Amino acid sequence: MSALASIHDLTVTYRRDGNAVAALRNISLDIVAGERLAVIGESGSGKSTLALAIAGLLPVSSAVDGRIEWPGPGCPPLLGRDIGFVFQDPSASLDPVMTVGKQIAEVARTHLGLTWSQAYAKAKTLLERVRLPDPDSALHAFPHQLSGGQKQRVAIAAAIAAGPKLLIADEATSALDTIVQAEIVALIRRLVAEDGMTLLFISHDIALATELAERIAVFRHGQLVELGTTARIVGAPAQAYTRTLLDAHIGLDAAPLLNRSGLHA
């Protein structure tokens, strides 16, 4: 299978209190077109920095070495059109003074060249696709009128409004309760399958990663320490650190995880 994006020797350094801190160190990784890839690791492991680098959202104060090539699109992708990004906190990513419908419609209008009427019709269809209750009313609602899970559904709808090739979900479930987490994971899985998108799922939760991913990349201290199929990572981890992440889930057993994911060791 061909690579949508190829990352070569990527190092990202931030300035902190006058010191240079490497958030990523010499990362080389292919994101295969059409795959579902999870990047897992503890806080500070560099996984979110990787997502920001791929999306072109790193702060201007960061220093970047290495390169990201895009053989899939054939040219650098545009955020919003080619890359959809779902952030951890929908309350921060959604505009509090703009209606839900306008926020989604604006993405479609900007990147697809639709009229406002067409863009609002698409926004309603997207709200139906993410299964937001009463999409007609939701179009005219403001983010503060929705629950956390509903706001994340809106954020997902906006992220896929222009039909991106790559959907990046950066800790998109960590601010939600367990039941809503499962619903959002199921929603992402369905939308990715329906639209044929490539998924990059960033999470500290290896159990959630197994729900979505065909491959898992394990990050620690800014380095890629293990990469493999979900079945292999869960069933026979090669690194002690990966085993530690698995063991962090009380009673975690490979068999039910793999069965739940539809995978086999």
Image (cartoon, rainbow, N blue to C red):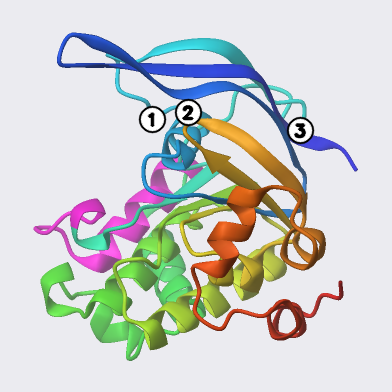
> Does dot 1 land on a helix, a strand or a loop?
loop
**Image position of 118 with respect to 71: above or below:** below
The location of residue 67, given as percent across then percent down, is 61, 14
Q: Amino acid at mark 1?
A: Leu
Q: Are marks 1 and 2 in contact (CB under 8 Å)?
A: yes
Mark 1 is surrounded, within 10 Å at the Cα level, by few (under 14), some (14 to 19) or many (20 or more) other residues, namely: few
Q: Which residues are magenta?
A: 92-112
**Residue 53, label in figure:** 2
Label 3 belongs to which residue?
Answer: 72
Q: Amino acid at mark 2?
A: Ala
Asked if residue 104 is among those painted magenta in the image, a careful observer would answer yes
Q: Nearer the viewer, residue 49 or 134?
A: 49
Q: Is residue 172 left or right of residue 103?
A: right
Quadrant for the C terminus, please: bottom right
Looking at the image, which residue is at 52% across and 74% down? 185
Q: Residue at x 51, y 57 (%)?
A: 160
Callout 3 secondary element: loop
Toward the front, the furthest residue is 240
Q: Which residue is mark 1?
A: 57
Viewer-side label of 1, 3: 1
The alpha-carbon separation of the residues under discs 1 and 3 comes to 20 Å
**Amino acid under disc 3:** Gly
> Residue at left 33%, top 51%?
106
Point out the tag, 1 or 3, that comes first from the N-terminus: 1
Work out whether mark 3 precedes mark 2 in sequence or the reverse, and give the earlier one: 2
